Structure formats: structure tokens, C-alpha cells
Image (spheres, rainbow, N blue to C red):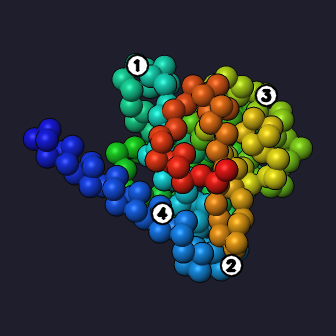
Amino acid sequence: MLRYCSRNLIISLSIITLSFLLLLLNPKAVFSAPKKELETKATFILNFTIFVEWPSSVSDGSNDITTLNICVFDNTPLVKELSLQKEKYNSSKKVSIIAVDNTDKISNCHILFIGQANAADISTMLAQIENKPVLTISDHKSFNKNCGIIQFVIKDDTVRFKINNEAAKKAGLTISSQLLELADE
């Protein structure tokens, strides 16, 4: 039974990885309009949950979080897109999509997306969750330089991402080598 589950897990992860690669390598299929950009970012965010490991202290020592809180700071279109895609999301992890409009409400987030419109609040939010196991994501240009973990970038009309692995380690998160290989330099 365990062998069967492991085999299914390996097959599922292989399919997800292949899909992830195809998504990155096919610009016309990935990004043709703002709606597609939003869909792509939502897909990435949901798939990041598969390739990131949170410390056992977050999950009461069981090494598995039953529900991941994905918080979106003041970006209603992304909240809606994540909620739509969550229905198609196939993972052992349950996700909860939370719209956050106040920096005081980010303490229960496992993933925090900070939208472009909130550049002035980025430093405040990053300081508030410093050394906490929160995967921070944004599309703000200087996000990685400000100790953010994943920064979305547009390259050749394709949504791509950069990873600040040092910031991830500082937060206590482990990012899989597969995801690190997919990231832009």
C-alpha cells in the first residue's frame, strides 16, 4: 500500500513538474493578456505550495500542515482567481484563500502575496513577519532585494519568477531544488 502511494506521489509530482516546465517554456500559452497573467500567477502560487516545506513548528510537530493560509494583500482580482483555481488544485494540502487589507492580519499566513499597488507597505510587512515561516511573494520590482522570497517578473512576455533562497532559509522554509532550478537568476 505504501509503495503504491509513493508511486502515485512520484507520478503526480512528475506531472506537476512537467506542467510547470511547459508553463514556463511556452510564452504564447502562458501570457497573452492581463487575465492570463493573473491565471498564471495564481497557478504558480498554488504550485509553490508543493515545492516548499514549512518547519515542523508550524504544524504542531507533525511535518504536515493540514491547511495552508494563502493571504493576498489588497489584490481582489488575484483573490478571485486563486479561489477559482483552488477548485482545480490537486494536492494533499488543503488551501485557504484569505484577502487581507490590513498589515495586522498577516500573522496567520503561510504564504503572503503583496500586490504591486502596495509597494509602500512592503517593508513594514516584511519586518512584521521577519524570521517567521511565511513564503512572501510579490511582483514589485525590488522585492527580492528587500528580503522578499519570490518575485514575479515578466520576461519575453512570459510570467517568470526569481527566488531569494537566503531569505527563504532565514524564514525557516526549504525550497525544493526542482523549484530553484526553474527560477530565473
Disc 1 marks which residue? 61
Going from N to C along the chain, the mark reached first, 4 or 3, is: 4
Q: Distance from label 3 to label 1 (Cα)? A: 26 Å
Q: Position of residue 98 (x, y in %)?
A: 61, 47
Q: Distance from label 1 to label 4 (Cα)? A: 33 Å
What residue is shown at x 65% (from left), y 70% (from top)?
Answer: 158
Disc 3 marks which residue? 127
Going from N to C along the chain, the mark reached first, 2 or 4, is: 4
Going from N to C along the chain, the mark reached first, 3 or 2, is: 2
The residue closer to the viewer here, 79 or 124, is 124
Q: Distance from label 4 to label 3 (Cα)? A: 33 Å
Q: Amino acid at mark 3?
A: Ala
**Which circle marks residue 170 in the picture?**
none
Q: Amino acid at mark 4?
A: Leu
Q: Distance from label 2 to label 4 (Cα)? A: 20 Å
Question: Seen in the image, is 125 located left or right of residue 47?
Answer: right
Disc 4 marks which residue? 21
Q: Distance from label 1 to label 2 (Cα)? A: 43 Å
The residue closer to the viewer here, 120 or 184, is 184
Disc 2 marks which residue? 33
Determine contact: label 2, label 4, CB under 8 Å.
no
Element under label 4? helix
What residue is shown at x 34% (from left), y 52% (from top)?
Answer: 13
Count the marks. 4
For disc 2, the neighbor class at 10 Å (few under 14, some 14 to 19, many from 20) is: few
In the image, residue 101 sits, relative to residue 128, either above or below, namely below
Element under label 3? helix
Q: Amino acid at mark 1?
A: Gly
Residue 59 occupies quadrant: top left
For disc 3, the neighbor class at 10 Å (few under 14, some 14 to 19, many from 20) is: few
Determine contact: label 4, label 3, CB under 8 Å.
no
